[in-house]
Image (cartoon, grey):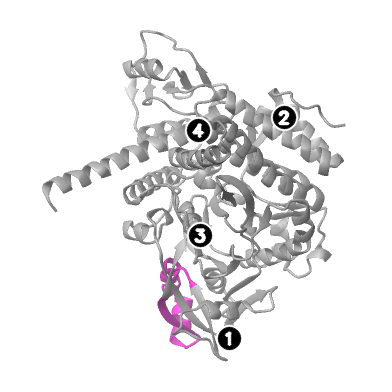
């Protein structure tokens, strides 16, 4: 490499490290302000105080941006944090305009980097809860910054393709930063740099599947289709592979294949001829934003594979009860979809109608590990549900991706602006109104009318756009779909095991919190923040649209139960927010996540009367 090229490479890595570190600080403060400092009265956002006691760069940033000072107190350590944000945010969706500083007792202001900031916040939380410092969470934050740096070095963000399915792939593989309210949004523990480049969607990865042949007596599968899961898999397998009366094919993520081949029970099954390792073969598949769900445009199904890697909160393996649960939700949605699509023509639900795995019929914990390790779910592709001329775009690529997402949504709005010959802000309002109607009505109706609890967060929603405008909304991932226990008794769920039933059941209260968090906090808060960046008046108008559509939903489809929930939102009852920082701090499993109150902007709008 020439000297100039080497210098440029070093510079690009340093720039990526700086950008990754800065975004880490922003997301950490997002979490801390929403979950700790705000609720405990340790946060203020306002004008400059102590004119002679602030760093020069803070004063310059205030002059340049016209923003406000964010001041966070850490009372147990006595430290104070200072930065500039563009203004107050009722939902803690702050936009940071300056470097970050800390002032310890008896010392002057010191410039912060992400490691010091993370250490300060975790130390304060440890003192508050009388617990040791959480080294595991600190390591996850380190992992997240390292992954983000790698992604920034390898990614080439740009305008999405004009070809619909290629644009879909690009959107799935464009999540540079990840969840804006998670302390370690890109954490992938135990992953080498080489594997990061080889398998991460953000690097544009694509690769062949790794196939195994399994003796049919050890096959575990179910299907609600006319074909069995192994028949579907065989039909999509490379030309050189074929099943027979003795063996069936099972594809795996190649990352997972390495785990399986290193498992003692799998190695023994290979030695005794129960399983054959066929290696990587066939066309390249594309990892989607979840990393473990793989896509090929010509395959009628996504393959949702197991992956024994902790990604953010969870090890992403498919437990048997999750395999069963996906099919049970598919059965329920197949019965509901005809009427749902008549009422809400723009909604489509990507069903999960079959699964396959391996059961070695051993009475030990290792057999369970093997079954979970091979578990794979088929998810419906777009082939039969995508309207002509519509391009599917992952919602997270627009609303959960910081500056890169903001650029993509502005491209769509510019397309709509040009197509409709209307001003930008009018296009933004019409776009968002259409989006809210397309997703809110069916999600609320599934919950209130049918007791089905969807998780419409940004990675579970795909938006079908044409001419820049939303035309369809696709809901996906039945792992997160639950059923209101009062609506679905054990007799109605006879097709699945007691463990699967327990995993599907939520109370009404749990269900409403999950729907409200995913829809209003994870989805609409971020969408509004991205669309209205730098335009506070537009932000208020977009929240007013959410309120308007709640009113419309209640008037057309609501009942007494929905009226109580919607009235509470109109009256300003706080929204439920998932406490990702607190949950990670206490090392809670994702299923034990707690919710905390998030300020509800709908209550201050006063546009529509409450329902009686």
Left or right position of 295 against 443: left
Residue marked by disc 2: 573
Of the numbered discs 1 and 3, the one sitting upstream in the chain is 3
Q: Which mark is residue 30?
A: 4
Of the numbered discs 3 and 4, the one sitting upstream in the chain is 4
Of the numbered discs 2 and 3, the one sitting upstream in the chain is 3
Pair 1/3: label in front: 3
Look at the image and give the residue range highlighted in magenta.
Answer: 252-281
Give me the residue at 64% from left, 54% from top.
Answer: 475
Give the percent coordinates (x, y) of residue 24: 41, 38
**Mark 2 element type:** loop
Graded by Cα atoms within 10 Å as few (under 14), some (14 to 19) or many (20 or more), the crowding at tag 4 reads: many
Graded by Cα atoms within 10 Å as few (under 14), some (14 to 19) or many (20 or more), the crowding at tag 3 reads: some
Is residue 361 among the parts visible in the rendering? Answer: no
Relative to 234, residue 246 above or below: below
Of the numbered discs 4 and 1, the one sitting upstream in the chain is 4
Residue marked by disc 1: 216
State the count of labels. 4
Give the percent coordinates (x, y) of residue 555: 83, 38
Q: Is residue 278 magenta?
A: yes
**Mark 3 element type:** helix
Residue marked by disc 3: 165
Give me the residue at 42% from left, 81% from top.
Answer: 278
Pair 3/4: label in front: 3
Graded by Cα atoms within 10 Å as few (under 14), some (14 to 19) or many (20 or more), the crowding at tag 2 reads: some
CA–CA distance in space, label 1 to label 2: 55 Å
CA–CA distance in space, label 4 to label 2: 21 Å
Q: Quadrant of residue 529?
A: top right
Relative to 579, residue 590 above or below: below
CA–CA distance in space, label 2 to label 3: 41 Å
Q: Quadrant of the C terminus?
A: top right
């Amino acid at each position: 490499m020439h000297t100039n090229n080497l210098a440029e490479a070093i510079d690009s890595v340093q720039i990526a490290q700086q950008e990754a570190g800065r975004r880490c600080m922003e997301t950490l403060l997002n979490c801390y302000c929403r979950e700790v400092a705000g609720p405990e009265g340790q946060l203020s956002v306002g004008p400059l105080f102590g004119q002679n006691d602030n760093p020069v760069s803070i004063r310059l940033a205030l002059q340049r941006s016209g923003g406000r000072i964010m001041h966070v107190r850490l009372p147990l350590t006595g430290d104070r944090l200072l930065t500039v944000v563009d203004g107050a945010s009722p939902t803690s969706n702050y936009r940071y305009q300056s470097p970050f500083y800390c002032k310890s007792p008896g010392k002057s202001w010191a410039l912060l980097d992400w490691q010091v900031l993370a250490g300060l916040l975790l130390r304060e939380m440890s003192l508050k809860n009388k617990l040791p410092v959480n080294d595991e969470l600190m390591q996850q934050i380190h992992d997240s910054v390292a992954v983000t740096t790698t992604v920034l070095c390898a990614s080439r963000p740009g305008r999405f393709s004009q070809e619909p399915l290629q644009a879909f792939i690009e959107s799935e593989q464009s999540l540079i930063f990840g969840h804006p309210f998670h302390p370690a949004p890109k954490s992938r523990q135990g992953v080498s740099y080489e594997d990061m480049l080889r398998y991460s969607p953000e690097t544009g990865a694509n690769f062949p599947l790794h196939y195994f042949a399994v003796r049919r007596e050890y096959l575990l599968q179910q299907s609600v289709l006319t074909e069995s899961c192994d028949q579907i898999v065989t039909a999509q397998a490379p030309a050189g592979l074929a099943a027979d009366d003795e063996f069936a094919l099972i594809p795996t993520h190649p990352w997972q294949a390495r785990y399986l081949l290193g498992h003692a029970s799998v190695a023994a099954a290979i030695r005794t001829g129960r399983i054959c390792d066929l290696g990587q073969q066939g066309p390249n598949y594309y990892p989607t934003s979840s990393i473990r769900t793989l896509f090929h445009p010509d395959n009628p199904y996504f393959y949702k594979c197991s992956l024994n890697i902790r990604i953010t909160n969870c090890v992403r393996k498919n437990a048997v009860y999750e395999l069963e649960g996906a099919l049970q939700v598919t059965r329920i949605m197949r019965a509901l979809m005809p009427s749902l699509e008549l009422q809400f023509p723009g909604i489509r639900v990507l069903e999960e109608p079959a699964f396959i795995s391996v059961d070695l019929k051993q009475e030990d914990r290792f057999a369970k590990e093997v079954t979970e390790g091979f578990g794979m779910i088929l998810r419906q592709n777009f082939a039969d549900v995508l309207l002509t001329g519509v391009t599917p775009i992952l919602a997270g690529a627009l609303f959960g991706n910081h500056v890169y997402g903001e650029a993509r949504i502005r491209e769509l709005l510019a397309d709509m602006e040009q197509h409709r010959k209307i001003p930008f802000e009018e296009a933004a309002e019409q776009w968002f109104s259409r989006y809210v109607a397309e997703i809110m009505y069916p999600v609320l109706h599934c919950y209130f009318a049918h007791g089905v609890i969807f998780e419409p967060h940004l990675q579970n929603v795909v938006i079908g756009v044409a001419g820049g405008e939303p035309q369809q909304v696709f809901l996906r991932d039945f792992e997160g779909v639950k059923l209101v226990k009062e609506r679905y008794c054990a007799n109605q769920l006879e097709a699945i095991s007691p463990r699967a039933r327990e995993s599907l059941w939520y109370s009404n209260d749990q269900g409403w919190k999950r729907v409200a968090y995913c829809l209003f906090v994870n989805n609409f808060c971020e969408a509004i923040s991205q669309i209205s960046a730098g335009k506070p008046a537009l932000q208020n108008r977009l929240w007013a649209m959410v309120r308007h559509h709640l009113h419309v939903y209640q008037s057309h489809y609501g009942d007494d139960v929905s009226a109580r929930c919607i009235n509470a939102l109109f009256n300003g009852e706080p929204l439920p927010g998932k406490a990702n920082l607190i949950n990670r701090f206490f090392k809670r499993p994702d299923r034990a996540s707690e919710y905390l109150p998030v300020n509800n902007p709908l209550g201050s709008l006063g546009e529509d009367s409450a329902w009686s």
